[in-house]
Image: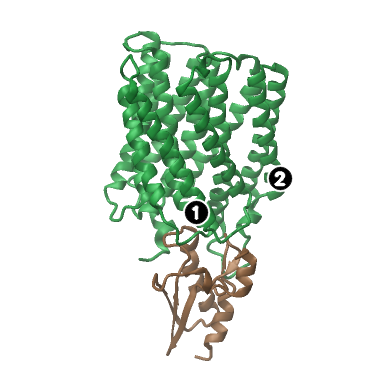
Chain colours: A brown, B green
Amino acid sequence: MSVNKEEILEVLKGVIDPEIGINIVDLGLVYDVRIVDKEIVIIMTLTTPGCPMHSSISEWVEKVISHLEPEATVHVNLVWEPRWTPELMSSEAKRELGY
Amino acid sequence: MNQDSLVSSYAPPFKVIVKYFVASVLSFILLNFLLMINYSDVNGFHFQPKILAMTHIATLGWITMVIFGAMFQFVPIVLEVKLFSTLMAEIQFWIFILGIVGLVTGFWNFDTGIHLTASAILLNVAILIFSINIIVTMTKVKKWNITGLYLAASIFYLIVTGAAGLLLSINLGFPFIKINHLQYLNLHAHVAFIGWVSMVIMGVSFKIIPMFTLAHGYSEKSGKIAFWLINIGLLGISTVMHYENLTASFYISALFIVVGIFFFLYQMMVIFKSRLRKKSDIGIKFSKFAYTMLGITTLFGILITFTNLSNEMNVTLIYGYLIIFGYISMLTIGQLYKIMPFLVWYHKYSSKAGIEKVPMLKDMFKEKLAASGYYIMVVALAGVIFSFAFQIPDCLLISFTVMFVGSVIFLINFLYILFKA
C-alpha cells in the first residue's frame, strides 16, 4: 500500500465534529494510525463516552480512509483509555475554543 | 462498545420523535396567540376556565409533548438500550392529542362532568402507555447513571400527576375529594413541575450541557444530593398535602425541595465553570437564562409558601408565568436549538459527512434571528411580570404580543431547521 501515516492524518482532518466545528485530528481524538499490510487501524477516542453527536465519527473515519485507499480494510478502534483531555488539542483548536 | 450504534440502532426513527416536537412547538404558538387575544381574562384569581385551558395547552401540549419526544430519544441513548416499542410511541401520540383537545375545550367552556373526565381518562391512558414503554425499556438497562436515575423518577411523578389530574377532573363535576380542591390542585401542579418536568430537565441537563460545552473532570456529587433531597421533599409534600391541615412536615418537605433545587443549580454552575467552550451559543444562552429563572422562581416560591403573599393580586399568575415561560419555555427553546439541528443533521447529512461538504450545526438555523428572539422573549417576560404586578391591562396586551412575536421567531427557525437547512 502506498499510503502513509501522514497522508491518513491529513484526510482525517476532513472529519469535522459538526457540533464543535473542529476536526478530529486537531481535537486530539486520534491516538494512533497503524498500517499493517492492507489493513489500516485507527486508534481513537471521543470527548465524551456515549455522545450521540460523536457516534457517527468512526463511520466517517472509515469512509474517508476507504475513499483515499479503496483497497485497504479500515478498522476504527475506539478506546477510552487514556481518557481524552483538553491538553491533547492542537494549539489552534485550543485557541478556537478559548481554552 | 461500538459508539456507532448509539443513534442508529438504539434510538427510535426520526419521524416518531419529530412528530412530538412539531406538535409541541405548534402548541406553544397557539398558547401565545390565545394569551394575546384573551389578555383581559388573564387577571386575578388563577382558577378560571380560560386560564386553566391555556395552562394545560402549556403543560400538556407544549411541555409534556416535547418531553415525550426527548425521552424517546434520550432514554435509549443515555442508558444504551433499545426503545421497547415504537408502535406504542405512535399510538400514544394520537391518544394524547385527543385527550389534550378534549381537556382544553372542556376547561374553556367549563364543561365539567363527562367531557372533562373522559379527556382526563384519555390522557391517563396515553401516560400509562408511555410509562409502560419507558419502564420496560429501562428493565434492560445494564449500567445506570445519574441521568437515568432522574428520568426513572420522573415517570413515577408523571403517573402521580396524571392520576391527581383525573381525580380533580371528576371532583369538579361530582365533588368527592375531602380536602380543598385548590389544595389538591396545588399538589397536582407542584408534582407536575418539580417531579415530572424538572426531574427530566435536571437529568437531561447533566448529560447534554457538559456535552455541548465540553465540560470535563468535574464532580457529580451535588447532582446526586439534589436528586435525593428533591425526591424526599416531593414524597413528603405528596403525602402531607392529602390531609386538611398542613403541618410542619409540609414546610420541612418544601424546604428539602428548595435546598435540592439549589444543589442542582450549584451542580450546573460547576459544569459551566469547567467547560472548555467559553463562548455561549444561542442554545446555551437560553438555557443559562432558564437556570437563573429557576433560582429566582424557587426563591419566589419560598416567599409564597412561607408568607401570605399568594393572597395578593396576581401573585399566583406571576409565579405560574415565571415557571412556565421564564424557566421551562426558555430552557425548552434553548435545548431545541441544540437538539433539533442535530437530529435533522443526522437524518439528512450524516451519510455524506467526511466525503461531501456538509453544514455545521450552527448553520442549520438563523443564529442572529434566534438571538433577536431571545432578547424579545426576555423583554416580553419582564413586561408580563410588570403588567401583572402593577395591573396594567394595556401593557399586558403589548407584552403578550411581544412574546407571541418571540414564539413566531422560534417557529420560523424551527421550520428552517426542518425543511430548509
**What type is the residue that disc 2 sits on?**
Leu
| Place of residue B192 in the rendered image (x, y in percent of width and height, measured from the top left) | 42, 30
Image quarter of the N terminus of chain B? bottom left
Kindly indicate the quadrant of the structure image that contains residue A37: bottom left
Q: Is residue B294 left or right of residue B227?
A: right
Instruction: Tell me the number on the disc at residue B271.
Output: 1
| Place of residue A28 in the rendered image (x, y in percent of width and height, measured from the top left) | 52, 73
Q: Earlier in the sequence, mark 2 or mark 1?
A: 1
- How far is mark 2 from mark 1, CA to CA? 28 Å
**What type is the residue that disc 1 sits on?**
Ile
| Image mark 2: chain | B
| Place of residue B54 in the rendered image (x, y in percent of width and height, measured from the top left) | 54, 22
- Residue drawn at (49%, 11%), measured in percent from left and top? B110
Instruction: Tell me the number on the disc at residue B103.
Output: none
Frontmost of labels 2 and 1 is 1
| Place of residue B57 in the rendered image (x, y in percent of width and height, measured from the top left) | 52, 26
Q: Is residue B27 visible?
A: no
Please tell me how crowded label 2 is: few (under 14), some (14-19), or many (20+) other residues with Cα within 10 Å: some
| Image mark 1: chain | B
**Vertically, is A11 above or below B273?**
below
> Disc 1 on helix, strand or loop?
helix
According to the picture, the residue beneath numbered tag 2 turns out to be B369
